[in-house]
Image: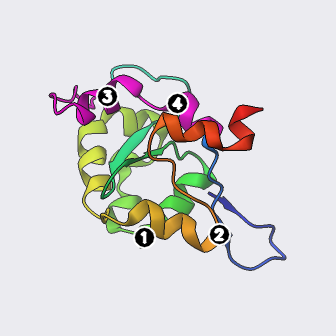
Amino acid sequence: MHARQAAEPGLVIDVSLQETLATMAIGELARAGLGRTIWSHRRTTDGNGAIVTILPASDAYADLAARGPQRAAWLSVMGSPDWGADPRFATKPDRVANWDALHALQHGPTRPDLAPSLVKPFGLRCLYDNRAAVWYSSVRA
């Protein structure tokens, strides 16, 4: 999600299919799909620069890697929850150190229709599995 230029009103939600596929935790999604125990969400390292959160939807999962201005936009989409200003989550190292608490809070406000309700107004479709990606011209290229 990116804020528009200062002269333009509103918010643009940038759904990057390629970034999602590149950062998606395939193993975790496969385990969830097969009904197996999901691995711990606790982060032990800094990762690739993003803190990836996988949020449940009614029939799929949404992969979120919000940082910087994107994090502020994501908090706005969630209704600006009070915990967004919590000092435990102020910086990326703070969020990594308090990952379990952050993960639980981000799951709390999600609705089963979260992903479709965020992307449909922009004429976009949700990608529910990797097989569907071959139908998107941007992925085939």
Q: Is 8 displayed left or right of 108 in the figure?
A: right
Disc 3/disc 2 C-alpha distance (Å):
29 Å
Q: Is 87 displayed left or right of 136 in the figure?
A: left
Judging depth in this view, the residue of 132 and 13 nearest the camera is 132
Q: Which residue is labeled 4 in the image?
A: 23
Disc 1/disc 2 C-alpha distance (Å):
21 Å
**Residue 115: where, in percent of width, then height?**
45, 60
Q: Which residue is labeled 3 in the image?
A: 30
- Mark 4 or 2: in front is 2
- Mark 1 or 2: in front is 2
Name the kind of residue labelled 1 in the image.
Ser
Q: Which residue is labeled 1 in the image?
A: 80
Q: Quadrant of residue 83?
A: bottom left
Disc 4/disc 1 C-alpha distance (Å):
25 Å
Q: Quadrant of residue 94?
A: top left
Above or below, 15 relative to 117: above
Judging depth in this view, the residue of 116 and 47 nearest the camera is 116
Label disc, if present, on residue 122 of the rendered structure: 2
